[in-house]
Amino acid sequence: MLLALPFPVIDPVLVQIGPLAIRWYALAYITGIVLGWILARRLCALAPVAATRQQVDDFVTWATLGVILGGRLGYVLFYRLDHYLAHPLDILQVWQGGMSFHGGALGVILALILFCRQQRLDLLAFADRVTAVVPIGLFFGRLANFVNGELWGRVTDMPWGMVFPTGGPLPRHPSQLYQAGMEGLLLFALLQFLVWRPAIRARRGFTAGAFLAGYGVARLIGELFRQPDAFLGFLFAGATMGQLLSLPMILAGLWLMARARPAPAPRVAA
């Protein structure tokens, strides 16, 4: 038997009053949205102004719907399409779990495009400020995965390996914490370093591209320690679904960064 750290068993339900239960996972979503909303207000007010405070407030609803609907549909399409084709009503059972970050990202991108078109906002400038706050939600979401004892890592002999309640008798990487550090803390620090610099803000789309590429790289690395979903396993060339879905993100992010240019200065009439 390999040495392992004890898993800190925490009840996934924070508070329960009769049939009403508040779970850590739901609290993670709420905390990420609220903190991201507060920071996005400040970032959008930086010169050049990307949106008003009221517009940021309005976009929160759009982004929330994009995350939930996109995340659920992404999970259905990318991970368990065969199951949901056979049991379509299960798609509505979101309380059973099953969300895809990549699907949620596509949902938010669509929300960004539609909202900016409706409000006549500069899409790239607004996307730079919005994506800079996304790692907050990723950080709390991965911590919630750890609390729930889900999405654990591969078997390891490292001294910090943990025996998860549903992961069998062998110690595993606490990959949720690795991902919280990379997708949450490190990516957040990088994006804040970029978005608070006027020269970078002037290059519209650069910070958004850095988010896409940065998340993709962090996910590629994190998946090296995370146990693939049992119903998928390893796919093409030994890659996981999370890695395959992250490759287009990296390419799109690098393309956005490469093409990012300051907005042309308005011409002054002679």
Image (cartoon, helix red, strand yellow):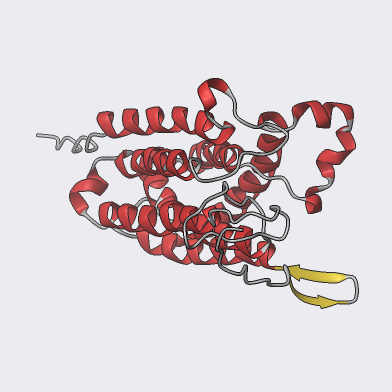
Say above or below: 23 vs 46: below
Image quadrant where one finds the C terminus: top left
Residue under the point 62% across and 54% down = 61
Residue under the point 61% across and 64% down = 28
- Foreground of the two, 2 or 112: 2
| Extreme-left residue of the structure | 270
- Give how far across and how far down residue 131 sits, in percent: 43, 48
Image quadrant where one finds the N terminus: bottom right
Residue under the point 45% across and 61% down = 53
| Extreme-top residue of the structure | 236
Report which quarter residue 16 is drawn in: bottom right
Say above or below: 137 vs 125: below
Q: Is residue 193 left or right of residue 182?
A: left
- Give how far across and how far down residue 42 sits, in percent: 38, 64
- Give how far across and how far down residue 169 sits, in percent: 69, 56
- Foreground of the two, 209 or 189: 189
Residue under the point 40% across and 29% down = 252
Report which quarter residue 230 is drawn in: top right
Q: Is residue 47 visible?
A: no
- Give how far across and how far down residue 95 sits, in percent: 80, 54
| Extreme-front residue of the structure | 1
Q: Is residue 95 visible?
A: yes
Q: Is residue 18 left or right of residue 206?
A: right
Q: How many marks?
A: 0
Report which quarter residue 127 is drawn in: top left
Say above or below: 232 vs 15: above
